Image (spheres, rainbow, N blue to C red):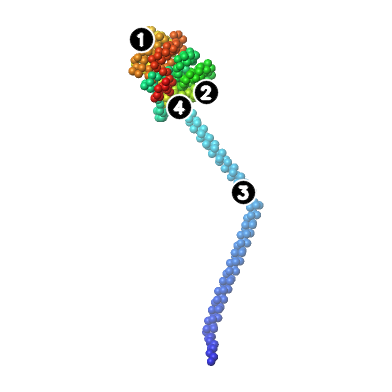
Amino acid sequence: MQKEIRTPVITEAETTRLYEQIYDLSQKTYKSTQFRFLAKRSALLIIIFMSALGFFALIFYFAFMKDYMKSLNSQLLKYSKSVESLNTEIEKLSTLEQEYVNQLKFYEDTFSSLKIEDNRLVDFDLTKSVRKNIAEIDNSAGEYRNISRGNTDFKEIALTFDLGTGEDLPFVYAILKRYNVRATIFISNEMNSTEYGSLFNQRHIDYLVKLYELGSEFGNHTWSHYNLKRSLYETSKRRRLSLSFISDEVFDEMGLKLEFDRVRNKFYDDTGIVLSPFWRAPYGAIDERILKIASMAGYPNHVYWSANKTGPLDFYDYITKRNLRVKNRGTGKYTRVKNPYYFSSAQMLARLKEWERADSHGLNGAISISHLGTSRKNDKIIYILPEYLSYFQNKGYHFVPISELINDKMDY
């Protein structure tokens, strides 16, 4: 039995409502399509406009702005260089201004240090420079040794010579060779010159090399042979310039280093011999400040000479005057008195023997000082050397260099 299909019945009201819905939908679809069309057209117009604008801007740039921009860049570069040049000039002026200020201060210090009497310049006061230099030394660090005696456990003596004029080198060499003695010699040019002096004498150099071959060693005695204490503390420029044994300028670490270096380099260039690390101040003129700046300049080991109640173990071979003129404070008159430091050669030999007897250690570790040439021409002390050496060698003493005298072993 077939099922009956029924066709639904649509009323007129439903039909009308359906048409209304279809119409509304059609209106929405039309508006949406119309909007998209307008949007695309507007975007196209904008693109065309912007392209045209860019095209015209490009044409305008190449036609008008390119040269202008180049000109503007050129001007900017020119202004930049001008500013740079101006900054450089300002820096130069600032530096120049500082130099002028420093010069002005220097001139003020200079004029304030002048000593003028009766409209004449009589001296220049170096007190400020001396004090400043001393303060710098006191604030610096420098360890040193001042060696005045070696090891007293052994019968060893150090025979030391300062070069001096060098005229006695041949005699001393002959005696040291005969008695098989090794000495320590402190080298100096004896004057502030780069053309003449003890180290410019070829005979001196030849004999110093011969002494080295005997086993002697060499220390530094400074180039110019200045009195270092006077060179450090002297505040009168006039006295500095008038006295040859004082440096013209205030002495400091660099000044002393130059003195050491000139000796070391000249001696090595002439002989090939390297100086030992020992030095001796001219005239024995030292204090803590001198020893400190010497240490900072590379020489921490200063070699002095021994002394006891008899006096220093100094040969006094440089003393030339037998008598001295001494002013009487009461009468104001001068009288002649015996120079206590003048000894005949016989008196000096007796004094050296007495020195040994008066010392609790004898001559053990003792350091003596004499010179290889002095201004003394009569009855020269150096001529007692053979008797001096033979006498003490017979008593069992051995003459050794400083480096062996201060060690902790017997070197013979």
Looking at the rendered structure, the secondary structure element under dot 2 is loop
Question: Which of marks 4 and 3 precedes in the sequence?
Answer: 3
Residue occupying the point 55% across, 78% down: 22
Does residue 145 appear to the left or right of 223 in the view shown? left
Looking at the rendered structure, the secondary structure element under dot 3 is helix
Question: Which of marks 2 and 1 precedes in the sequence?
Answer: 2
Q: Amino acid at mark 4?
A: Gly
Which is more toward the observer, 234 or 127? 234
Q: CA distance from mark 1 to mark 4?
A: 47 Å
Residue that badge 2 annotates: 272
Q: Amino acid at mark 1?
A: Asn
Residue 135 marker? none
Residue 105, how many percent across, how many down? 46, 28
- Quarter placement of the C terminus: top left
Question: Which of marks 2 and 4 precedes in the sequence?
Answer: 2
Q: Amino acid at mark 2?
A: Gly
Residue 45, how many percent across, how many down? 61, 63
Mark 3, other Cα within 10 Å: few <14 / some 14–19 / many ≥20:
few
Q: CA distance from mark 1 to mark 3?
A: 100 Å
Q: In front of the other: label 1 or label 3?
A: 1
Residue 298 marker? 4
Label 3 close to label 4 by CB (< 8 Å):
no
Residue that badge 3 annotates: 69
Q: In front of the other: label 4 or label 2?
A: 2
Which is more toward the observer, 277 or 52? 277
Residue that badge 1 annotates: 328
Q: CA distance from mark 1 to mark 2?
A: 55 Å
Q: Amino acid at mark 3?
A: Met
